[in-house]
Image (spheres, grey):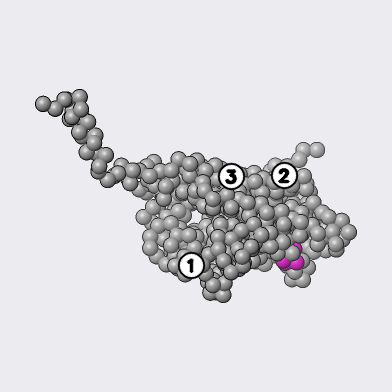
Amino acid sequence: MFKSSVFSYPKCLLAFALLLPDFATAQSSLDGANTSWILTASALVLFMTLPGLSLFYAGLVRSKNVLSVLMQCFAIACIASLIWLTVGYSLSFSGEGAFIGDFSKAFLSGIAEDTLSGDIPETLFAMFQMTFVIITPALIVGAFAERMKFSSMLIFSALWIICVYAPICHWVWGGGWLAEKGVLDFAGGIVVHITAGVAALVAAIVIGNREGFPDTPMPPHNLTMTVCGAGMLWVGWFGFNAGSALAANGDAAMAMLVTHLSAAAGSIAWMAIEWYRYGKPSVLGIVTGMVAGLGTITPASGFVGPMGAVVIGLSAGVICYWATQLVKRKFVIDDSLDVFPVHGIGGILGTILVAVFASSELGLFSGQGLDMSIAQQLGVQLTGVASAVVYTAVVTWILLKVAGLLTGGIRVSKEDEVHGLDLVLHEESGYKL
């Protein structure tokens, strides 16, 4: 007789279970490390807008408009979050359409605590992507600062998220036609920076220059505030780029490293140009160069190596600097806080340079050493840039006109602009004397 202690039924069942395929593991493959990192990255990206970008912009405007800029960024964070919940996430990341998603995940339908996107909760993926949709229209605020009605800004931003951000996000990250072509945009060169930058340029042209521009000096009222915001943007950008790896791995680590190096190189390049031209380096210049370096490395951050990142950052500092001079001095367009020349041009430059510095053909300057032809990938990247620029420009112009019709014009009166938007629109003042 067999001893029951050796061949007991429970032990036999256990041994049999060990021979079966690991169905439980296959069905539940949440990765705790990756989940923890993306939770952190989501907080960092939201930190970029609230308070990073808000303070950066608020310090750059005149004191009579400081609260209006803070209010606009805060309100956009709220309205963008609700739009993302209702239709934004679904239009961006559901369905198999080439140009737009469907409504199958509207109101996050079908997404529960145990629903996964890869090896992280889909609720977390939706939250991470929500922080991107928050900062993108907030960037556009810098173009029409100090002269747009608050009501017009809300309507325009809400419509823009649905009609511009969601479709282009689907093209690139949601399995749309650009994704099928193999476009490379790791963290938002096309989806965030090109769309925001082009929309900003169109908005600045449509709304017109501020009263007194360019003859009346309009210096930043509080550079201390701007530098604090810039520092928050720099730190928060690690979540933006390294978080886009969607894992706690070597790709995230490399993305963080190249992000930092590009920001440093962009800062030095911009500072050096001003130092050479004017005899003194400016605080505004070095922080603006930092943002240019960060925006330009964004699409390339998951594909290039350290040396490629340095070249990209230096290029960003030089090219974005001269772009600001062209927009404001040559074309006399009052993109108040330089959104297009910094984010738009930076996004375009970085998206194009991905094709160069991600290729294995460059040796030391290559990143992952992707097995691709520079020329062939360059064509794909240019297609992505051109389509995003044209679509964003046309739809943004239409939405600004719609917002104007709904609010009786998108711009405040000349008298209100002179008094300042803080008192006129909010009956509050940023500073009590």
Residue at 48% across / 60% down in the picture?
173
Mark 2 lies on residue:
228
Q: Which mark is residue 44?
A: 3
Q: Is label 3 or label 1 in front? A: 1
Q: Earlier in the sequence, mark 2 or mark 1?
A: 1
Q: In the image, 269: left or right of 2? A: right
Q: Is label 3 or label 2 in front? A: 3
Mark 1 lies on residue:
182
Real-space Cα separation, disc 3 to disc 2, in angstroms:
15 Å
Residue at 76% across / 59% down in the picture?
270
Real-space Cα separation, disc 2 to disc 1, in angstroms:
38 Å
Image quarter of residue 382: bottom right
Q: Amino acid at mark 3?
A: Leu
Magenta segment, which residues?
Answer: 319-324
Instruction: Locate the N terminus by quadrant.
Output: top left
Q: Amino acid at mark 2?
A: Cys
User: Which residue appears farthest toward the left when viewing the image?
Assistant: 1
